Amino acid sequence: MATTLVEEGIIEHVIESLEDNQKLIDLEERWNENFPSISDYLNQENFSLLVDEEKAYLSFIIAVIFLSWEEKFGKFEKDFKPKALEKIEESNWEKLNNAKGKSFREKLDVFFDGHSQEDLLAFIEDSVQEDDEQMVSSAARDIVFICAATILDTIIEREASNPFNKAW
């Protein structure tokens, strides 16, 4: 089944649009009202290890994924299944824990093998890399990456199973 890629240009456009904090606030309200599984997922106990700035940055990363997908394929109509999120998160943790590689970046290579949305996955990877403007501590890096990748993979899985979706 062929997929259409959410290109880097769309991702950059969404990032620029989120410079208006109100758009992110509106999206978080939309998640609370229409997508409680996302809100519940972001508020689970695992994320209590993140400091407030890391939680906010994680919300930003997920907003970029969510809005980039919607910009490319249209608005989401219904919520995600919590069990699907849980199953995909477990699988992603297993991949990361079993990944070969010395550096964090090398360990993430396993996620790119056959991934249908490489630009969005690369955005997540770039968002958690160590640099001068580091928004995520080394201790939180795994959590933020897995959470964002789980949201992306859940979107992909759900949308791939929708025979009327124009992405597939």
Image (cartoon, rainbow, N blue to C red):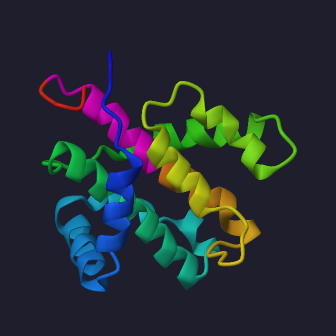
Residue, x 28% and y 48% (percent of image)?
Answer: 69
Q: Is residue 162 within the magenta segment?
A: yes
Q: Residue at x 36, y 53 (%)?
A: 9
Q: Is residue 130 left or right of residue 38?
A: right
Identify the main secondary structure in magenta: helix
Q: Is residue 11 left or right of residue 48?
A: left
Question: Which residue is at the far top?
Answer: 1
Residue 103 visible to the viewer? yes
Q: Which residue sits furthest right?
A: 102
Q: Is residue 50 above or below residue 75?
A: below
Nearest the eye: 104 or 46:
104
Q: Residue at x 23, y 32 (%)?
A: 167
Quadrant of the snapshot with the N terminus: top left
- Percent position of residue 23, x then y: 24, 77
Rendering coords of residue 21 (x, y %): 31, 84
Instruction: Quadrant for residue 140, please give it.
Output: bottom right
Q: What's drawn in magenta, residue-wise?
A: 151-163
Instruction: Pinpoint residue 73: horizontal percent, then vertical percent.
Output: 19, 42
Q: Which sits in the foreground, 161 or 110?
A: 110
Task: Name above or below for residue 112 compared with residue 145.
Answer: above
| Left or right for 163, reference 118 | left
Asked whether residue 39 appears in the rendered view, the answer is: no
Instruction: Assign the C terminus to one quadrant of the image.
Output: top left
Which is more toward the observer, 160 or 49? 160
